[in-house]
Amino acid sequence: MTSDPKHKSHDLTDGPGRAPARAMLKAVGFTDEDLSRPLVGVANTWIEVMPCNFHLRRLSAKVKEGIRAAGGTPIEYNTIAVSDGISMGTEGMKASLISREVIADSIELVARGHLFDAVVALSGCDKTIPGTVMALARLNLPSLMLYGGSIMPGRFQGHDVTIQDVFEAVGKHAAGKMSDAELHDLEDHACPGAGACGGQFTANTMAIAFEFLGISPMGCNGVPAMDPRKDEVAFRCGQMVMELLKSDLRPRRIITRKSLENAIAAVATTGGSTNAVLHLLAIAREAGLRLTMDDFDKINRKVPLLADLKPGGRFVAADLYAAGGTTLVAKRLLDAGILHADQPTVTGRTIGDEAKQAKETPGQQVLRPLSHPIKPTGGLVVLKGNLAPDGCVVKVAGHSMMSFKGRAKVFDREEDAFAAVKAGRIKAGDVVVIRYEGPAGGPGMREMLGVTAAIVGAGLGDSVALLTDGRFSGATHGLMAGHVAPEAAKKGPIAALRNGDVVVFDVAGRKLSVELTQKEIKARLSKWKPPVPRYTIGVMAKYARHVSSASEGAITS
């Protein structure tokens, strides 16, 4: 137990020499009593541009109430957010992954600059979730992260829909399978209110992963955004951070090699997003732990796919919550002997203790029993070969294609690939290659949901494969290989591909290759010239200069 809950803020608020600081704090409403208590930063990723984070001011108010009730003084501050769903398919999407670093940096800087004793971080959209936890790992103050929760599904033509359906409808519309009026009606009804995208896309994937990591309280992230219980959860999180402060339980005691393996297992068994690989690699680096892409594949091989969740399944995150939630997922993995049950969490209990509290809703169909998995292994696979010496990631949840062989159609920009799909130039048997969209080459490693959804919408989801040094949305499904490393802009072999080259996916064998000799690949690359940087000034240029490979988490620290 720490002897001084004001272990940092004493230096900010105490003594005659700190009168100027106290004067400025009193100008915004703080009292002597407030300043005598521990100062707890409430890092809020609220922004008005998207539903994912739109409601976080409401939750922040409840977190602050909980902190005050437990004897602390909350100080709310904001960072940035970029909506993947809104920026998708535009130049703006390049800002999304870069925003993760800016979020982490800004949360860290404000907390260090004002000597906060503890931190609660609120997240919503995809990059705000890992960005907040990266900051907490760096700061290593008593802290936790609360996810704002999932949106509820919309209703269209008598059935539930998500934003995934809208993206795929663009492909249907381009193929003449949906009218203008139908597309407009769908966009009017797909997103009924606040909350992050409803399937097991990146936001919900990372929300579950961080409960298993232990940095979010088990069962709290899964409460939907507009569920009345979310306010109760937020209040409890405010109280909980004060308990963490009193017990001096810090992120680097919670984020361990074993808890990272728990997080990977949770992603695998729920059919989570490929982006989890990128983000968990980044978290490991921030916590000073070794983790590689190969570790994901090793864990995936022994974890069954149990959750029947979109994009490949039938249900959404709110359905999983109603079925028994994250705690039920933990119980399944505990019963399977896969969970490292002794790992601590921010609740003060081990994850094994949390799993034992699971309550399964009778008759639920969202999470399969261990005796009847959807697949015997998890939803993420890492491939290597002469096209991806450092690896690439394939999501196998939601499709059955384990091999594919086709001729490459090569594009150096996402926009060109999307135009080709809409124009009907992509045919069954093609392998769509999108390069120079990696962390440095993009820069920013854009997600390709617009392209992948258009392929599915055009009826080619089972007959076309795609590979890219960029990323995929968690809503992507089909045979898609992303995060190809090294990337094209760093002279990776993907830069040597030409139209008509035969590309082979061998998922079972964990290989991605092109039918070329190493001599031919080397000869082509000897003539390669680096592309002209797309940005020469500003944050994009700075990121491109400093970012690591996708195989290392695409981090800048």
Image (tube, rainbow, N blue to C red):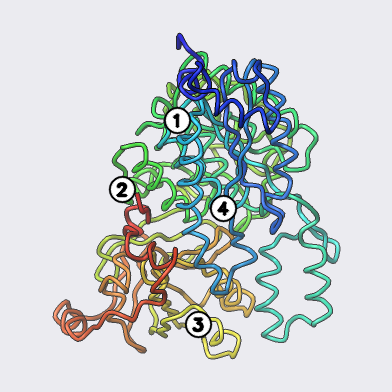
Q: Earlier in the sequence, mark 2 or mark 3?
A: 2
Q: Nearer the viewer, mark 2 or mark 1?
A: 2
Nearer the N terminus, badge 3 or badge 1? 1
Residue found 69% across the figure and 59% down from its top: 49
Mark 1 is surrounded, within 10 Å at the Cα level, by few (under 14), some (14 to 19) or many (20 or more) other residues, namely: many
- Labels 1, 4: front one: 4
Residue in front for this viewpoint, 506 or 149:
149
Judged by depth in the image, the label closer to the viewer, 2 or 4, is 4
Tell me if label 4 and label 3 are in contact, CB under 8 Å. Answer: no
Residue position marked by numbered label 3 in the rendering: 417
Q: State which tag comes first along the sequence, 1 or 4.
A: 4
Q: Earlier in the sequence, mark 4 or mark 3?
A: 4
Pinpoint residue 25: horizontal percent, then vertical percent: 62, 30
Check if mark 3's residue and mark 1's residue have beta carbons within 8 Å.
no
Asked if residue 198 can be seen in this view, the reply is no
Q: Are marks 1 and 4 in contact (CB under 8 Å)?
A: no
Contact (Cβ within 8 Å) of mark 2 with mark 3? no
Give how far across and how far down residue 19 sits, in percent.
Answer: 55, 23
Measure how far apart labels 4 and 3 are at the Cα level.
24 Å
Q: Which residue is mark 4?
A: 126
Q: Looking at the image, can residue 412 be seen?
A: yes
Residue at mark 1 = 339
Q: Which residue is mark 2?
A: 292
- Tag 2, which secondary structure? loop
**What residue type is disc 2 on?**
Thr
In the image, 285 versus 68, the foreground residue is: 68
Whether residue 248 is situated above or below residue 140 in the rendered picture: above
Decide: few, some or many residues near mark 3? Use Cα within 10 Å; few <14, some 14-19, many ≥20. Answer: many
Label 2 – label 4 distance at C-alpha: 21 Å
Task: Determine the secondary structure under disc 1.
Answer: loop
The kind of residue on which mark 4 rests is Asp
